[in-house]
Amino acid sequence: MPAPHVPLPPTDRVLSPRTGWTRAHWEAVADSLLAGVAPYATPGLAQYRLPGRGSWSGVVSDGLEGYARTFLLAAFRIAGAGGDVDARLVERYAAGLAAGTDPTSGEAWPRLTDCSQQMVEAASVAIGLHETRPWIWDRLDARVRERVVDWLSGFVGGRTWDNNWRLFQIVSEQFLASVGAPYSQADIDGGLDRIDDWYLGDGWYTDGDGRNFDYYNGWALHLYPLLRARIAGDEDGDRAKVHKERLTAFLRGYAHFFGGDGAPVHQGRSLCYRYAAVAPVWMGALTGATPFEPGLTRRLASGAVRHFTERGVPDERGLLTLGWYDTFLPGTQPYSGPASPYWASKAFLGLLLPPDHDVWTARERPLPVEEGDQYLALPVPGWLLHGTHHDGVVRLVNHGSDHNPPEPADAADDPHYAHLAYSTHTAPQSAPRAWKRTVDNHIALVGADGTPSRRVRIHPLGTGDRRASSWYAARLAGDAEYRIESTSLLHGPWEVRVHRVEAPPGATVREGGHALADGTRPTVSTGPHWAVARRQDGLTSAVVGLYGWDEEAAVSRDIEANAFGPHAAVPYVESTAHAGGRSVHVTLVVLSGDTVHPRELREAVEVSVDGGEGPDALDVTVRFPDGTELHA
């Protein structure tokens, strides 16, 4: 059966001219997801043991994850309908609570121990219990309530990982407090204080110490503090006011992360959560902390869920898989099990808003990229966002997030953080064999054995209007390090990268563009100083060597290396036999729905280097055909 695999109601193009979706579509998707997991429940309904690769936590923990994350979805569905749902849905999750907390049931959930995966899942259980209190918690047998409290009490005085995990303890102990059970106010306050340590301004937190910027900023670090306030009934308290102000600041730029087709930018970890990316948008509406018009909130959120639904998510079995569209394990982390994708349940937070709320009744408003070409500088994470109206593509230029702890701790690179750019329409090459070569969206020194240098630690140098810079220490065989400083300059659908490179004699300098992947092989072509890959839908990735590159360019192909499809192609340019010392390399990188003419671009875009040929050059000037000049 072709996608979508969810039975959907008729569209409403008057209310929702962009997506056609209404609240009924959201309810249909929620019901389909809940029905899809039902056949995989254990007899007592305490675990959902879904098919797929297990996590490193084991089958019982994975089964709990299946219960907890789908219970979160069920809770939003039940509460959003005022309890007017099929009674079997309420009974199903109430029965699971009874069996999961009963040590004699044969389905008992693991106890909460320090830094255990159970802590993550317990937070979803606590939130679900709060939201469904009149229909589930208040009707539970007293002995079951006691067992639930006993299980959640494993948090009290417990130790979590020092990152977004602090939030799971906060909301769970706040729930204990709300039902009159023992809890630690010191745990709650200490966790909230620790989150404050990671707030760096403009709505951005780093997830723990270091430069860890990704979707956890929205679906965790902004979300749980306000859920805690909701549980505490303290939504107007001093803490909540601060968290609302921060969420508003974050959301001001957040709509720029979504393409015209609804897709979020493909960057960071845990991307199998997919449309959980819209959770902070709903939280803004739920708490009154949104800068968006109601119609923009719904258009953004509906667009994201519709995007995945139309591309086969959930699959023909009704399940969310470990991947982006299809199952794609190289794009996941070892902590993710078969039920991990159901953190996507957070996307349905909007169902808590009543049907007559403005977000459901207002006419849809366009996304920023639907109104015109967009440029947005985000100095805290060190990112530039640029979207083009004609093709709906949004690109993220990365000069700040590497997901590593601060020095001198050990560091490693990751395909979802280390690249120079990401987008709504492409994904990095993340299969091990492709990642070993690291061609796409990376400038590398390549040794004689073919091993490229890695962009492990990103050192930001500044982010401003259409411009961002950083450097990294390139290492080849041995301990010698060579500085590669890169500046990105944006103009229309184009990114110009100016690199000031230190290299040993004989090294090769190589740079790749966006990896283009699809179900069929992209067509490719090359010429002097340029290489192009093009998908059947017209999306094109190109690199054009404007200065400092050898004449020869090429395309790297791979199979089963990319979350967007089995066939991938990466255009790249290189310069061989470096003389040693310093050099300047300038590249035009294109990702566009337009036809790209690389030969003509190279002739039309001029580059001049004033004051020498190395990194000490006074200025690199790039002149475009329309007369625009950019400097690096």
Image (cartoon, rainbow, N blue to C red):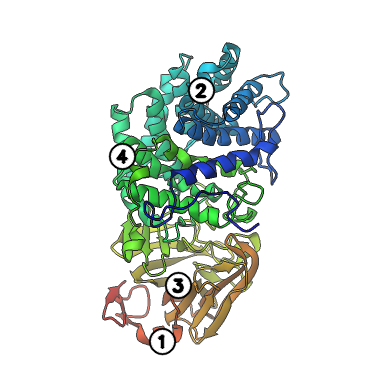
**Image mark count:** 4
Judging from the image, what secondary structure is the residue with disc 4 in? loop
First in sequence: mark 1 vs mark 3? 3
Q: Tell which tag, 2 or 1, sits nearer the viewer.
A: 2
Residue bearing the label numbered 2: 135
Label 4 to label 2: alpha-carbon separation = 28 Å
Label 2 to label 3: alpha-carbon separation = 50 Å
Residue bearing the label numbered 3: 593
Residue 378 lies, with reference to residue 206, above or below; the image says: below
Task: Name the residue nearer the viewer: 367 or 460.
Answer: 367
Q: Tell which tag, 1 or 4, sits nearer the viewer.
A: 4
Q: Residues within 10 Å of mark 1 (few under 14, many from 20)?
A: few
Residue 86 placement (x, y as % from top left)? 57, 31
Amino acid marked by disc 1: Glu
Task: Name the residue nearer the viewer: 406 or 244.
Answer: 244
In the picture, which quadrant includes the N terminus? bottom right
Amino acid marked by disc 4: Ala
